[in-house]
Amino acid sequence: MTETARALSTARTLWDLLARRADLTPDRPVLLQDERVLTFGALRARAERVAAGLYDMGVRPGTVVAWQLPTRIETALLSFALARLGAVQSPVIPFYRDREVGFALRESKAEYFAVPGTWRGFDHRAMARRLGARGVFEAYRDRDLPDGDPALLPPPPASGTAVRWIYWTSGTTSDPKGVLHTDRSLIAGGSCLAHALGLTASDVGSMAFPYAHIAGPDYTVMLLLYGFPAVMFEHFALPGSLAGYRRHGVTVAGGSTAFYSMFLAEQRAAPGRRLIPTLRLLAGGGAPKPPEVYHAVVREMGVQLTHGYGMTEVPMITMGSPDDTAENLATTEGRPPRGMAIRIVDGEVRLRGEAVCQGYLDPAQTAAAFDADGFLRTGDLGRLTPSGHLVLTGRIKDVIIRKGENISAKEIEDLLAAHPAVGDVAVVGLPDAERGELVCAVVEQPPGAPALTLEEAVAHLRAAGLSPHKLPERLEVVAALPRNDTLRKVLKHRLRERYSGTVK
C-alpha cells in the first residue's frame, strides 16, 4: 500500500475519505459508465447537493433510508449523499422481490425507500406500494435525485464507529439477517482489498456486481484510496459487456468464480486474440475457486488471477496477492491483512478485527454469532498454512456424513472441476436410509462437451487419488446450476430440495 493510500485509510468516515481524495485529485475520474465520466471532485460536489435535497425532504443523521437500486453512477451519488448526512443506509439487492424487500423494510424500520421505478420490466414503485413502504422516491436518473443548497447542511458526521449500514444476507433457507456495519468496518474491508492487490492510479477497475452488495463499498474504498476509476455495469452479460471493458481499457476485472468461468468461455470462443487487450488481472471472491480455474485463466487468458475470502459480515478477510506463488494463488484464499485475526477452532474459521461487523439487527443472532473472546463464528471450515495463507475446506453445513465419515464437498468439487467435460459442479449430500447421506455431484457441462456419466466421473476421481468412501453414488447433469443474482454463487439448498425426493 502506498503512503498516500495508507494515510487515507485512517479516514474516520466514508465521507471524510471522499473529501480527502477529492482534495488530492479533484479532476481525476472515479466512475465511468457508457460515455459518462464522474471525477472525484464532481462526486463530492454533486453528492453534497443531493444530501441537501435529502435534508430538505427530512432525512437527518440516524434516519434509516433503504435503497434498492442498480449499479449506476446515481446509486453511488445517493449513497455518498446519505453518508454525508450520517443517515443509516439499508441497501437491498435490486433483484429481490416482495418477500425479501418487505422483510428488510420492516426489520430496518426504514423511513424512506429509494427505487428505480420500472427496471428491467419490474415495477419497483408498485411493489413499494404493495408493501406499504414509507417515503418512496425514485433515484434512477440524475434528474430524479433530490437537489438542494449545500450551505444549509449540518456538519458531516465526525465518528465512523456508529452503525450506519444494514446489509442483508441472502436468506437462502430462512429470512435474511440484517448485518450491522460502520463506516470504519467498511473502510477496513476495502483497505484489505487495496493492500493485497497493490493497484496504482493508472489502473482501471470494474464493477460488474450489484452496488447494493457488500462488495460495493469494498470496491469503492479501494478507488478512493488509490485514486483510479472503475467502469460500472448496470447489467453484466457476455459477450455484450465486453465492449465496455475494451472501450475504457479495463485492467482489473472479476467478481467471483462464475465471472472467471464466463470470461474463460469467451476467451475459448476466440483463442487467437486477447479477450480484453488491456486486462492484466482477474480478482474476486464470494465463492470457492477450484485450482483448475486459476490455472486455466493464467494459461488461456494470459492474465493473473487473485482470489479472496469475504462475507456480508466481513467484507474482506483474506486476499491473494499478485506476487504470491502460483501454488498459493491456486490453492488458498490468500493472507489476512494486519489487524485481521484468524483463529481455527475445531476446524472452524473465526475472525476478529476492525472489518468485522457489529452483529445483527436481532440481538439473539448477535449473541450466537460471537464466541466468548469476541471472535465471529463464520461457519466455514479451514486451516492456516505455515506461510499464513488460509485454505478453506468447506462449510460446516456442507460436510456430508456418509456412514459416519465426514466428507468435504469442496474436495470433490475441486477434483471434478479439472475434468474437461465439467464446466461447473456442486456436490451435495442427499438423505439416504442406508448411508445417512449419499454423495451427489451436480454438473454443468461446457458447450459441446460429450455427455458425462457417473462411471466416467468416478474413474476421474479415482485417478486423482480420492478415497473410495468419498466417491459420488449419484451424478446429475443440468443445463445450468441455480445461482443467486449477486456474485452468481451456486444455491446448494435448491439442489438438495430438487433431488432429495427422487431415487436413482
Image (spheres, rainbow, N blue to C red):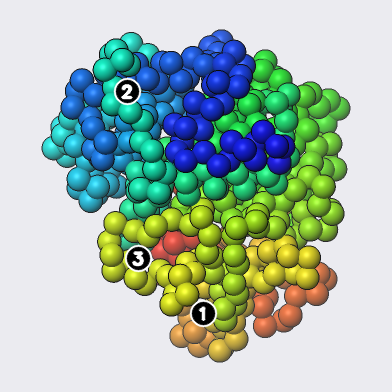
Residue 286: image location, x then y, percent: 56, 51
Q: Which callout, 1 or 3, points to the residue nearer the camera?
A: 3
Does the rendering let one see residue 491?
A: no
* Amino acid residing under circle 1: Glu
Residue 65: image location, x then y, percent: 27, 36
Separation of residues labelled 2 and 3 (CA atoms):
32 Å
Q: Residue 410: which quarter of the image? A: bottom right
Q: Which callout, 2 or 3, points to the residue nearer the camera?
A: 2
* Amino acid residing under circle 3: Thr
Separation of residues labelled 1 and 3 (CA atoms):
31 Å
Which residue is under mark 2?
Answer: 51
In the foreground, 381 or 123: 381
* Amino acid residing under circle 2: Ala
Which residue is under mark 3?
Answer: 366
Which residue is under mark 1?
Answer: 437
Residue 233: image location, x then y, percent: 53, 26
Residue 118: image location, x then y, percent: 30, 23
